[in-house]
Image: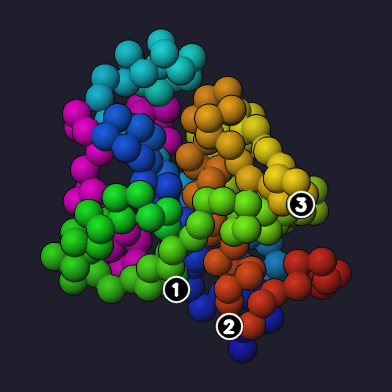
Amino acid sequence: MRSSCESAGGSAGLDFGATRDLSALVIVYQDGACVFHVKPFCWLPGDLREHSEQDHAPYVEWAKLGFIAPIGESTDPAVIAHKIAAINGQNHIASLAFDRWRINDLKRELDAIGCHVLLEPHGQGFKDMSPAVDIVERLVVQKKLRHGAHPVPQWCAANAVVTRDPAGGRKFDKAKSSGRIDALVALAMALSLALLRAAEPIDIEAPIG
């Protein structure tokens, strides 16, 4: 029998980049100790050396190590759709949260290959992102995130700037951040699905054991 913290499948978040931007797919799986195991997949179109100089990030080295993948001259939704299908075939994705940006392109590609993952829209404003920001912070403090020292989400987290609205709501602000934060946004959406939208929400503040 699964413990109350184990998931029947992974929850995912996708920050689908514009034509020349970083795209990030993050899958999170929960274990019996309420620890979240994070698997990021990242793509960057265009010339990685050029992007490295512009962003002051070692994209070429990350690509050699498999932490980031080139994706042609522009972001190709078919490539990302095939990766989602492959992951889902190996370890079921229960649901995938997405930003509405270009999502119809991805849906078309998923339909074309017969991949039927449950897609759930996730707003990027204060209302939807504030609880997600809280979740990320809480799990980091509680040391309940395991990402295998993947450098891309670590770099995105270091770049991130959080802004507040008058009511105290918070969100990650791409415009004010010092660099790309896509993998962090995708992680926040994945955790939001896993914890806030689950049929039986998990109490991550409960004692481990």
Which residue carries the number 3 mark?
167
**Residue 73 among magenta residues:** yes
Mark 1 to mark 2: distance in Å?
Answer: 11 Å
Q: Position of residue 84 (x, y in %)?
A: 32, 59
Q: Amino acid at mark 1?
A: Ala
Left or right of 83, for residue 165: right
Badge 1: how crowded within 10 Å, few (<14), some, or many (20+)?
some
Which residue carries the number 1 mark?
94
Quadrant housing residue 95: bottom left
Secondary structure of the residue carrying numbered label 1: strand
Q: Main secondary structure of the magenta part?
A: helix
Q: Amino acid at mark 3?
A: Ala
Q: Amino acid at mark 2?
A: Ala
Q: Nearer the viewer, mark 3 or mark 1?
A: 3
Q: Position of residue 29 (x, y in %)?
A: 55, 64
Q: Report the magenta residues as a range.
A: 61-90
**Which is nearer the eye, 32 or 15?**
15
Residue drawn at x 42%, y 47% as measured from the top left = 15
Secondary structure of the residue carrying numbered label 2: loop
Residue drawn at x 42%, y 53% as measured from the top left = 99
Residue 4 numbered tag: none
Secondary structure of the residue carrying numbered label 3: loop
Q: Position of residue 39 (x, y in %)?
A: 49, 51
Residue drawn at x 46%, y 18% as measured from the top left = 55
Which residue carries the number 2 mark?
199
Badge 3: how crowded within 10 Å, few (<14), some, or many (20+)?
few
Mark 3 to mark 2: distance in Å?
Answer: 28 Å
The answer, for residue 23, to whether it is visible in the render is yes
